[in-house]
Image (spheres, rainbow, N blue to C red):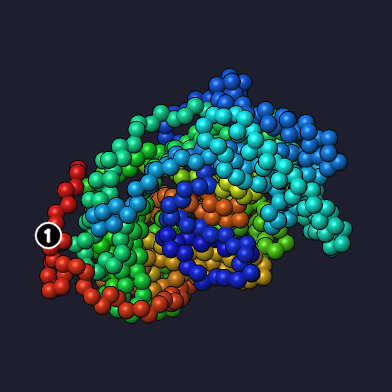
Amino acid sequence: MKICEFSAKRRNARFRGKDFARAAACWMLAAQLAGLPIASAGGDKTTAKPAAASAASDPVLKAMQNEMARATAELGKAEQAPYYLSYTVYDQDYVVLVGAYGSLLTNSAAQRRFADVTMRVGTPELDNTHGQSRPSGVNSGSLPLGNDADAIARVLWELTDREYKRAVPTLLNVRTNTAVRAEEEDKSPDFSKEKPQTHIEEAPTAGPFDRAAWEGEIKRLSGAFRKYPEVYFASVMIQVQRSNSRMVSSEGSAIVSPSASARLIMEAQTRAEDGMDLLRVETFQAPAASGLPSEAELAGKIEEMAADLSALRKAPVAEPYDGPAVLSGRAAAVFFHEVLGHRLEGHRQRDEEEGQTFTKKVGQEVLPKFLSVIDDPTTREMAGMKLAGSYDFDNEGEPARRVEMIKDGVLENFLMSRMPVRNFAQSNGHGRNQPGRMPTGRQGNLIVTSTKTVPEAEMRQKLIEEVKKQGKPYGLYFDDIQGGFTLTTRSLPQAFQVLPVLVYKVYADGKPDELVRGVDIVGTPLAALTRIMTTGDQQHVFNGVCGAESGQVPVAAVAPAMLFSEMEVQKRAHEHERPPLLPPPGFEDGGAGKDAQMKAEVKP
């Protein structure tokens, strides 16, 4: 079972039970503290040094290499010797500040170091990881901080021993199952042979994080929500993180990639009289806190969020609809990430529990001819925004590569890790994972381009023309989304659901656009993807964090606005809890309240 879900920090518990034990979840708006790639996030300049020189000056890397050599030599004497072993050590140093209504809820900083030991026993044709649903293949644990080589080696030794004792019995089970079960349709090997890589980077140059200044700003920004009595929950969070990933393998790879990131999330929630919860979230990402928007810009966004929530509370609930629709660029980007991107991840093409929507469609037209789709982790910036899915090397030590998946509507390639699939024997640098998980083929920066465009300002008029042509009273314009999910397993319908936030009825008779709420986009991929008629002429970026079988990884999706000849929507399920019975403090008399009179000092 594979589900990819977007949500704004709150996950819907709609799916439960053993059938969903292998579910994937995407939180494109949620802050995450783990799951960084072996990568540079882009932005600040890094330089590479020879591996030998770096190992001499990096006690941690040297300890990893020494223990790797010892473990390989000793386990090589065993009856079932590993044919592949790798160590990956993650250093993370982060600060998290969370504010609500003018005070801090969280003010924390931490350092941590942990390691993944990945082991393959058997042969590349058939090993202990076969099937990918088994936990065997990787073992993780905390590693000592500091540069005590003996302490680091001792923990790596223990993790290696534990994984070997798990891998050998698992291999025996794999061989037994392979002998007694029906022959698999895809007989590709379990692991590809790749050239060892050496890449050592110095830490990016970044100024110090002014924690005291940001504490004040988070208080002021979160305090701005106090003047809105209909905002029932609000928070502002910043997470600043510096990381360093080191990887060594028995094949001879040695990779060191530092990275840095800053992510700011503002969330506000209200509830309509019928009990429907309404949410607005704004996220911002940069290589460093200095690259985030100014406090004045963020304060302006807060005003917009509050205005949107106020309008949504008064908006009517939309009815089920099937007709013309426009997705804004950000909404289209999420749509493609969910509906198409996950179905082009390599491991899904050989897993017989998957729907394999596009497995046998290579060389066939799967999109309108004017659309092309690539995934390019080497692209750092588009449309004036840094891309969250950028990296130099994937988590299997392979160089990031630009992959042209669909060209002029025709499917050409999949996103490959080192697990081959039929007709695709090599990695293309998309093996990614969260620490503690086995890598699989994953999206990085999914980019949709079009050769059939109109000025973005004309998209609304194109929608009206199509509405009139079909004899519909109105079309729908989806301006922003809060999340969504897709089902890719063959045991359930091949369906998707996207959860919009701001949706407008655009009337054919010239009546003003009408904001509506409580509607979800639904459909099936093969039908929905062929109904795109034209696109806007500007690219829009959606940054976030996506989770699937291999855990949570940073991603980006880029697309223009799109006109669909047909889009189906349904009513959204919601709770029926009433809004708060008491007014917020300071608003007892229905007036502005003392808190509303508090003027937050916003810096330009």
Left or right: 452 as drawn, with respect to 116:
left
Left or right: 2 as drawn, with respect to 31:
right
The location of residue 199, given as percent across then percent down, is 58, 28
Whether residue 315 is visible? no
Q: Name the residue under label 1.
A: 597
Front residue (pair 407, 72): 72
Front residue (pair 45, 582): 582
Kindly identify the residue that appears in the image at 67 percent across and 42 percent down: 159
Left or right: 269 as drawn, with respect to 131:
left
The image shows a total of numbered marks equal to: 1
Kindly identify the residue that appears in the image at 60 percent across and 52 percent down: 550
Q: Which amino acid does the dot numbered 1 rest on?
A: Gln
Q: In which quarter of the image is the N terminus?
A: bottom right
Q: In terms of secondary structure, where does tag 1 sit?
A: loop
Q: In this view, does 229 lie above or below 66?
A: below
In which quadrant of the rendered view does residue 475 lie? Answer: bottom left
Q: Quadrant of the C terminus?
A: top left
Whether residue 384 is visible? yes
Q: In this view, does 373 lie above or below 183?
A: above
Front residue (pair 480, 580): 580
Kindly identify the residue that appears in the image at 19 percent across and 67 percent down: 585
- How many residues crowd around disc 1 within 10 Å: few (fewer than 14), some, or many (20 or more)? few
The location of residue 409, given as percent across then percent down, is 58, 54
Q: Is residue 249 above or below residue 439?
A: above
The location of residue 237, given as percent across then percent down, is 34, 51
Kindly identify the residue that appears in the image at 87 percent across and 62 percent down: 180
The location of residue 260, given as percent across then percent down, is 44, 37
